[in-house]
Image (spheres, rainbow, N blue to C red):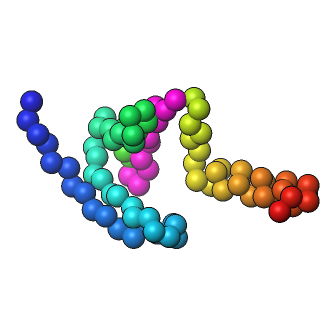
Amino acid sequence: MGLRVVFVNCFTNPTGMKGMTMLVLSRQKDESIMIGDEVEITIVDVRGDKVRLGINAPRNIAVHRKEIFLAIQKEKEGQKVGNGAH
């Protein structure tokens, strides 16, 4: 089994998270990346500008699209304000 080189770039994170760098990897259909020992992200399909991802992660790790994650965070903040928590 030969070693395969993958194109890798690091960019300043465009999400504005300070002190973080974004790792950019090139992958093709049916190829995967691992995050830690337990999270596998597989490229399931590529059609035009749409990429379908398969995410295999333990049930205790929440996986959301970013817009859903942000909505959840906003709702949590609203609940804190409504309850008088600071």
What number of labels is visible?
A: 0
Residue 29 seen in this snapshot: no
Residue 61 seen in this snapshot: yes
Q: Please state the horizontal and vertical placement of residue 42, each as a whole percent of the image.
A: 37, 37
Quarter of the rendering occupied by the C terminus: bottom right
Residue 14 covered by magenta stretch = no
Q: Is residue 79 left or right of residue 18?
A: right
Residue at 59% over, 32% down? 60
Q: In this view, does 61 lie to the left or right of 36?
A: right
Q: Is residue 65 left or right of residue 53?
A: right
Q: Read off the magenta span.
A: 48-58
Residue at 78% over, 54% down? 75
Q: Is residue 32 left or right of residue 67?
A: left
Residue 56 covered by magenta stretch = yes
Main SS class of the magenta portion in the image: strand
Residue at 50% over, 70% down? 18
Q: Please state the horizontal and vertical placement of residue 57, each as a whole percent of the image.
A: 49, 32
- Nearer to us in this view, 49 or 82: 82
Q: Residue furthest left?
A: 2
Q: In this view, does 18 lie above or below 84?
A: below
Q: Please state the horizontal and vertical placement of residue 28, each as a whole percent of the image.
A: 28, 43
Quarter of the rendering occupied by the N terminus: top left
Q: In which quarter of the image is residue 30?
A: top left
Q: Is residue 75 above or below residue 43?
A: below
- Nearer to us in this view, 5 or 82: 82
Residue at 43% over, 50% down? 50
Q: Please state the horizontal and vertical placement of residue 40, each as a whole percent of the image.
A: 40, 35
